[in-house]
Image (tube, helix red, strand yellow):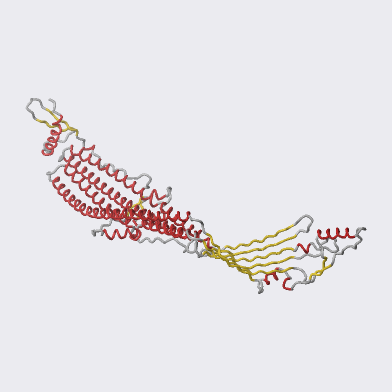
């Protein structure tokens, strides 16, 4: 007679209960046979395979908890503060934003360098020669010191010296032979200063000062970006660190649950061997043991994944030897029963958020543009002045010079032609002689070399000066007016962006405060649930040992306690992550961890 499939499970349970209650009357052989009565004359039997005593392993193999790429026995303890410190030193994203600040510092120094004095020294020698004439050599040694001033003006101090050979003296010849008998050089020195100062346009602000102000504000913006990046990275480190704490605690919890299952299996095997338990109970415990081994392996994988995420934030190089280390967090999750005050959190966020500070600097940059473009709509009135001392000297002896009246080639040709006409027989006039003239000597202070020329600069008749005004203005000036209108439109846009960002900040703060409050309450409730689960398991174990409970209920209580413990440690982890997120949205992360970020050099 065939047994309907739906009743097979009921028969198995009856057999297990019967075997348990009459263990002394039913011998444990290679096969256990139970007879079930029925109204038919046929006798139906149900056979269950029971392993021999010698087939039961003395100890079950433990699951492999080794992780890929991690050396066994290379555990390194790490605290949260150590992790944050290493992230600030090694994180590549922080390094990029730190270099942005350094680069912007160089831009500020580059623009300020426009006010550095500039010294110019220009020695020049020149040779002049024309066909049929004697070459002359000239030497100029010019130097100057110029600088732009913070008032928009500029000055140039100059000191020029020149030596020029006198072509007239070189042309002097003796007795009309054409041979040069004397040569001299003229020396001149010039010392002075030129000053220019705008009085209207470019007086309070010009393009250079505008660019410097903007560069300084952008430097403060990059500093705000660096602080925001540092806060974000620290927040990520906190979240991943607490995730690693949870993963390791979860792994330990799963291992403890696995060990409990192994102990249950050992006990049931002893009971089966003693004949006080049915062989079918062993399969139930082995199934649960295999499930818990899978949970342990998954927990181990989670540890490896989270640890790699933490190493990505803390290690600089992808080939660092620390990738093969096993990091063990030593900090325990913190918990505070004190609720967070929303108003205080909103106030901190409005005062500290780098995004709001960046928009504030953008508005200040826009104000610089408005000030500059307003100034450019004005006419330009520049004051220009020059003061100089001039000295002059000539080389040679301070004697009178005797020479002929006509000395140049043209004059001599004209004189010769005149004499040819006068001596014609038809005219009979005597030739005209080339009269000799005497050039009287010059004053002694005009003769000498470069030294005499430089000393002559300080004579009372040497000073020279000029004062003037340059006035210019474009007709209609549409360019400056259009630029001013565009800057005013951008001002309105920045005000709108600021209001929008403030709303975003408030929403983030409210959500973060709610998350902290929720996770705080979840921690309290999960602790109560875990405590009650422990009480229930202890009571269920006593009932099972007294034979008043089943294996299924015992296993269910054990799993319930494991889940309650996981919920508790997850709640504690989520609470610390929520606190880290609240610190991020209020930008109090740096203060909470006593981190001081030095402000960049602004070179004011």
Answer whether residue 429 is visible to the viewer in this image: yes
Instruction: Say which residue appears at 19% left-offset and 53% top-offset.
Output: 528
Q: Residue 511: x percent and y percent?
A: 27, 53
Name the outermost residue toward the right.
Answer: 425
| Residue lying at 11% horizontally and 38% vertically, measured from the top left | 22
- Position of 552 compared to 228: left or right? left
Where does the image place residue 483, in percent across and percent down from the top left?
A: 45, 54
User: Is residue 91 left or right of 434 when viewed as pictured?
Assistant: left
Residue 242 vertical placement versus 433 (above, below): above
Measured as percent of width and height from the top left, residue 221 is found at 41, 57
Viewer-side residue, 273 vs 307: 307
Q: Quadrant of residue 10?
A: top left
Residue furthest toward the bottom?
460
| Nearer the observer, 509 or 257 | 509
Q: How many marks?
A: 0
Q: Is residue 99 visible?
A: no
């Amino acid at each position: 007679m065939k047994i309907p499939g739906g009743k097979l499970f009921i028969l198995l349970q009856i057999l297990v209960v019967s075997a348990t209650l009459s263990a002394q009357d039913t011998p444990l052989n290679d096969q256990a046979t139970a007879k079930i009565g029925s109204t038919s004359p046929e006798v139906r039997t149900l056979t269950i395979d029971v392993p021999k005593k010698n087939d039961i392993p003395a100890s079950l193999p433990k699951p492999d908890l080794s992780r890929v790429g991690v050396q066994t026995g290379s555990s390194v303890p790490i605290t949260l503060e150590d992790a944050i410190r290493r992230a600030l030193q090694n994180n590549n994203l922080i390094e990029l934003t730190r270099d942005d600040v350094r680069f912007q510092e160089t831009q500020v120094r580059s623009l300020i360098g426009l006010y550095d004095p500039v010294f110019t020294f220009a020695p020049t020698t020149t040779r002049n020669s024309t066909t049929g004439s004697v070459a002359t050599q000239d030497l100029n040694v010019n130097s100057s010191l110029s600088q732009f001033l913070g008032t928009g003006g500029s000055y140039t101090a100059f000191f020029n010296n020149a030596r020029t050979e006198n072509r007239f003296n070189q042309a002097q010849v003796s007795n009309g032979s054409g041979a040069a008998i004397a040569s001299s050089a003229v020396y001149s020195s010039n010392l002075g200063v030129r000053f220019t100062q705008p009085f209207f346009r470019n007086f309070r602000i010009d393009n250079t000062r505008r660019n410097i102000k903007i560069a300084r504000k952008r430097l403060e913006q990059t500093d705000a970006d660096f602080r925001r990046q540092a806060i974000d990275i620290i927040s990520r480190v906190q979240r991943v660190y607490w995730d690693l704490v949870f993963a390791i605690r979860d792994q330990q919890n799963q291992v403890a649950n696995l060990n409990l299952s192994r102990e249950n299996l050992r006990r049931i095997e002893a009971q089966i061997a003693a004949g006080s338990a049915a062989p079918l109970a062993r399969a139930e415990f082995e199934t649960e043991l295999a499930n818990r081994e899978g949970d342990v392996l998954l927990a181990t994988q989670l540890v490896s994944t989270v640890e790699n995420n933490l190493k990505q934030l803390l290690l600089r190089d992808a080939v660092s030897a620390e990738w093969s280390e096993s990091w063990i967090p030593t900090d325990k999750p913190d918990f505070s029963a004190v609720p967070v005050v929303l108003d205080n959190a909103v106030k901190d966020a409005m005062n500290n958020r780098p995004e709001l500070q960046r928009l504030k600097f953008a508005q200040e940059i826009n104000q610089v543009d408005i000030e500059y473009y307003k100034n450019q709509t004005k006419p330009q009135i520049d004051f220009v002045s020059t003061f100089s001392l001039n000295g002059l000297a000539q080389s040679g002896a301070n004697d009178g010079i005797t020479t002929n009246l006509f000395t140049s080639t043209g004059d001599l040709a004209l004189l010769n032609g005149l004499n040819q006409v006068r001596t014609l027989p038809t005219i009979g006039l005597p030739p005209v002689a080339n009269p000799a003239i005497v050039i009287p000597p010059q004053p002694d202070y005009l003769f000498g070399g470069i030294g005499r020329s430089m000393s002559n600069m300080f004579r009372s008749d040497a000073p020279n000066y000029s004062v003037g005004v340059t006035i210019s203005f474009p007709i209609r000036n549409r360019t400056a007016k259009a630029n001013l209108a565009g800057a005013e439109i951008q001002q309105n846009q920045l005000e709108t962006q600021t209001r929008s960002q403030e709303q975003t900040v408030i929403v983030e703060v409210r959500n973060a405060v709610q998350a902290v409050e929720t996770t705080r309450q979840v921690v309290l409730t999960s602790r109560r649930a875990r405590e009650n689960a422990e009480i229930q398991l202890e009571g269920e174990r006593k009932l099972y040992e007294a034979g008043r409970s089943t294996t299924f209920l015992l296993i269910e209580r054990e799993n319930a306690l494991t889940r309650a413990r996981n919920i508790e440690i997850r709640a504690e982890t989520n609470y610390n992550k929520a606190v880290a997120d609240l610190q991020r949205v209020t930008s109090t992360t740096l203060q909470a961890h006593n981190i001081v970020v030095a402000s960049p050099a602004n070179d004011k």
